[in-house]
Image (cartoon, coloured by chain):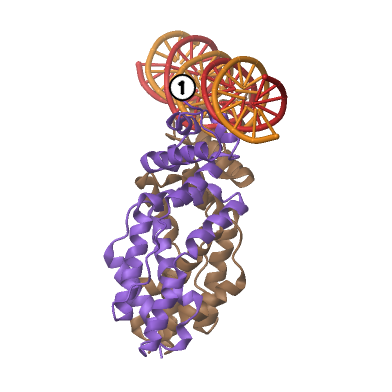
Chain colours: A brown, B purple, C red, D orange
Amino acid sequence: MTQVTRRRGAALEAAILRAAVEELQEIGYRDLTMDGVAARAGTAKNVIYRRWPSRAALCIAAYREMLPTGADGAPDTGSLRGDALALLTRANDRMSSPVGRILRELLGDIHSDPERLRELRDQVAHAGVSHWLTVLARAAARGEVGPAALTPRVATVAVDLLRNEYALNGATSVAPEVLTEIVDQVFLPLATRS
Amino acid sequence: MTQVTRRRGAALEAAILRAAVEELQEIGYRDLTMDGVAARAGTAKNVIYRRWPSRAALCIAAYREMLPTGADGAPDTGSLRGDALALLTRANDRMSSPVGRILRELLGDIHSDPERLRELRDQVAHAGVSHWLTVLARAAARGEVGPAALTPRVATVAVDLLRNEYALNGATSVAPEVLTEIVDQVFLPLATRS
DNA sequence: TCAGTAAGATACTGCTAGTAGCTTACGAAG
DNA sequence: CTTCGTAAGCTACTAGCAGTATCTTACTGA
């Protein structure tokens, strides 16, 4: 690309990551090639390989760049049902976005590498747990739920079921009726049982 | 391979499928190559491509061959908890077997092809639903559960959560404690609620 | 007996991950 | 201002695999 001044260190690394992010957003993980990233970043493949050991490693780093930084707080609609639907809808939006698609592609391609798998999983799975616990705690304060419901399993059951929908159905978004079904038939009965 | 008599039609097709099954069991979907299958079957790649349009299609056909034909019935331990644990343990065994690993590899590789995705999903997702409904119906007859619990969502919730564990954790088997946690904290409370 | 069909063998294209080695710009130390 | 090490840039390469093409040869059924 005949840069006027040759980039180095952090600047170059940032340029590569930005290129990888753009490629991921435009064509996804499956079709991303190292040559493509190098070309877009205006550099060469071996420069990339000096920093990341493989295509997967680069894409995981790029994926991390894509995550929204400003985490929004837990919703507070006044009822547990409203909060749960809001959280689940938000999770559904995230999972059906390009970011979610890329995460699923990555997860599907990594399950031979337990190391990378764990870091990816931790980053995503436990991302929203605290929100659910917050919402449940508020509901407990209102007397809506008993303390028996405050286990991680129950707190995450809705998101877990949503994730299962994606695992089975692939890339398409999950219908809102499924969300209400999960909330009304599973989450609320578990949370509010006497 | 200099066959004495050249195989044709169904015999050849069966030989190819058998070779593909063996390759899948030994090295998995990811590492299976068409050259490898052809060599093992003692034939040539283009013969395979005359019958299946792609590697994925061949492997789906081979996967179908691997499925156990003799479906065992629903367990009957006398209690809903025992039945549920038996069913969930069985599902866990299946999912942690080579067959389960191959299914996950296939699912992860197919989500661009909605057609194949659907046939695969139907084959597996709905495979065990009837068992859960049977077990729930028996429990209802014993008075253990109310009719409110007999929705497909509740019937499959345990397997759905188990599948989620695999989606997050990769190829490793799920610990028995997780199974009991799912049954005791989610399935039983939902099934037996008043 | 004689076609038509399909198996078999081989070679090829095209694509991509990852590697190697050389050249050249930068930048820090003196 | 000079020198020298490091890393960027460039180009070319290997190796492996999906999928295609072509030609020869064996079987089969009429």
In the figure, A105 relative to B78: above or below?
above
How far across and how far down the image is residue A124, in percent?
45, 58
Q: Residue A153 sits in which quadrant?
A: bottom left
Residue A137 seen: no
Location of the N terminus of chain A (image quadrant): top right
* Residue occupying image coordinates x 43% and y 54%: B67
Residue C30: horizontal and vertical position, in percent?
35, 16
- The type of residue carrying mark 1 is Thr
- Residue B77: name its quadrant: bottom left
User: Mark 1, residues whose alpha carbon is within 10 Å: few (<14), some, or many (≥20)?
Assistant: few
Q: Residue at x 39, y 52 (%)?
A: B170
Residue lying at 52% horizontally and 54% vertically, measured from the top left: A67
Q: Which of A160 and B163 is in front in this view?
A: B163
List x then y, in percent, for residue B172.
Answer: 33, 53
- Whether residue C8 is situated above or below residue B169 in the rendered picture: above
SS for callout 1: loop
Circle 1 residue: B2
Decide which of C20, B146 is in the foreground and name it.
Answer: B146
Residue A94: tell me if it is visible.
Answer: yes
* Vertical side of A72 occupied by A123: above or below: above
